[in-house]
Amino acid sequence: METVAPRRTLSTAAAALAIVLAVSACAAGGSPNDEAIFVPDWTPEDAPPLLVELNDRIGDLDQLSTDRSPVIIVDQFTGFDAIDDTTDGVHPTVEGEAKLIENWARALEPLLPRSGDPMNVMLLGDSITDNHYRAGLWRRLQSGGYQFDFVGTQHSYPLLVRVGELRVGDATFDSDHQGHMGWQTSELLLGSEWDPDGNLASWLDALGADRPDIVTVHIGTNDLIVGVASPADTVASIAEIVDVLRQANPDVTVLIAQIIPYLQRDFAAEPPR
């Protein structure tokens, strides 16, 4: 008896992408048919080569660890589907956020106390940090009884926030963070066109006594898809970020993500934010 593999169930994002592909085929003279709206499974082998190189280089950054200031690499790439787990080929869906939350939580939980003074945690990055996953991560850690305080000069709710993530008992969501929509790695160090005077050193100074004990870093997407930085340049900037964090706190622990995948396409006409 012939076994027929089930068709893939598409997420909303993947379905939208499939429709675009089908319309493009019609415009090129093709005819829409049932198969035209199904997108092949995404696999890690489909990741853009620059992204593969970047994550390989990030994987070596644990060599920056010192006895006082460990650097821990967190794999956010493995198991993340650039079709099903993104809304637009770049930014995570609710399901994609759940994967980010799980990986960050598993890295953070061994570092956080369950009693005594809370540890200051800075979530640092671009729009993937600014607009995603923070509420779910806060709820996960809060529900686990960990003592922590999100810190940063930015104060906002993520885009896909769900009401149930905003309260645990009497505690309400801590919206402090350091995610900057559209920013590249070097801009975290030097400032950007949106905020020429804003940079990591100035943000740490502004925090004063609330400078972070732990920093999570998810950065590099904009470098590769809209910037001119090479993977080597990006990793060099991440290493500089570690240096700046240590100037503010020589005992800081830095968790650096091997970043989530994105769909390779031409972003020049409409860069993601």
Image: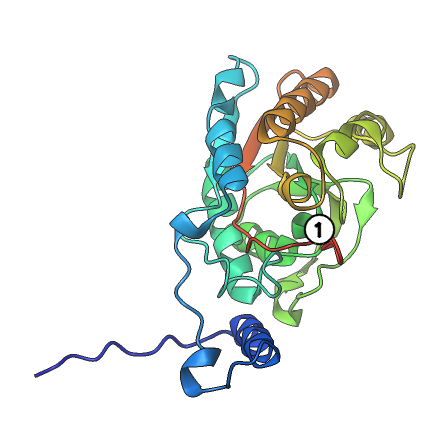
Q: 228 or 92, which lies in front?
A: 228
Residue 143: x, y in percent? 53, 55
Q: 44 or 175, which lies in front?
A: 44
17 on left or right of 182: left
Q: Is residue 112 visible?
A: no
> Residue at horizontal 12%, vertical 81%?
2
* 18 up-or-down from 140: above or below: below
Q: Is residue 238 visible?
A: yes
| Quadrant location, the N terminus | bottom left
Label 1 packing within 10 angstroms: few (<14), some (14-19), many (20+): many
Residue 182: x, y in percent? 76, 47
244 on left or right of 101: right
How is colour applied across the structure in the image?
rainbow
Residue 50: x, y in percent? 54, 38
Callout 1, which amino acid? Ser
* 142 up-or-down from 94: above or below: above
Outermost front residue: 29
Identify the secondary structure beneath mark 1: helix
Q: 126 or 88, which lies in front?
A: 88
Residue 227: x, y in percent? 72, 39
Outermost top residue: 67
The residue that disc 1 covers is 127
Outermost left residue: 1
* 62 up-or-down from 180: above or below: above
> Residue at horizontal 69%, vertical 31%?
212
Q: How many marks?
A: 1
> Residue at horizontal 59%, vertical 35%?
116
| Quadrant location, the C terminus | bottom right
